[in-house]
Amino acid sequence: MFLAMAKKTFVQLVDDFSGDSISDGEGRTVRFAFDGAEYEIDLSNEHVEEFSNVLERYVRASRRVSGRRKTGGASAARNGGNSETAAIREWAESQGIKVASRGRISADIVEQYRNR
């Protein structure tokens, strides 16, 4: 007779700020980005609230530049372009701003177009 053995693995979330263990439902992983780098930090509910409060005034004064990142699929450039990109190029040329007919458009030009 052969007896199979079972293996159980438990994951314990630890608050990266305090080092304390976090019980189920008492914390979460927070994702954020700063200076082009993305980060994750595991925080208790108390520290999530503190983190949110610190960032809140900066977020209110900020401009959101994009939604969540898309995963998979082809980019707009590989799919033959984007109508907004064409409109930005046309607008830039009408304003006397030099912009290449292909490739990435600088963020400064895109911002000028959107704030016109």
Image: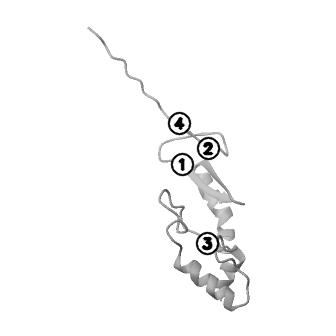
- Read off the residue under disc 3: 64
Going 51% across and 47% down the picture, which residue do you hit? 26
Regarding mark 4 in the picture, which secondary structure is present there? Answer: loop
Regarding mark 2 in the picture, which secondary structure is present there? Answer: loop
Viewport quadrant of the C terminus: bottom right
Q: CA distance from mark 1 to mark 3?
A: 26 Å
- Read off the residue under disc 2: 15
Regarding mark 1 in the picture, which secondary structure is present there? Answer: strand
Residue 101 visible in image: yes
Closer to the chain start, of discs 1 and 3, is: 1
* 87 left or right of 98 in image: left
Q: Which mark is residue 27?
A: 1
Q: CA distance from mark 2 to mark 1?
A: 8 Å
Closer to the chain start, of discs 1 and 4, is: 4
Which amino acid lies under the numbered mark 2 shown in the image of this protein? Asp
Q: CA distance from mark 1 to mark 4?
A: 11 Å
Viewport quadrant of the N terminus: top left
Classify 10 Å Cα crowding around label 3: few (below 14), some (14-19), many (20 and above): few
Q: Residue furthest left?
A: 1
The answer to whether mark 2 and mark 3 are in CB contact below 8 A is no
Going 60% across and 58% down the picture, which residue do you hit? 49
In the foreground, 77 or 51: 77
Residue 115 visible in image: no
Q: Total number of numbered labels?
A: 4
* Displayed quadrant of residue 88: bottom right
Mark 2, mark 3: which one is toward the viewer? 3
Q: Which mark is residue 12?
A: 4
Which amino acid lies under the numbered mark 1 shown in the image of this protein? Gly
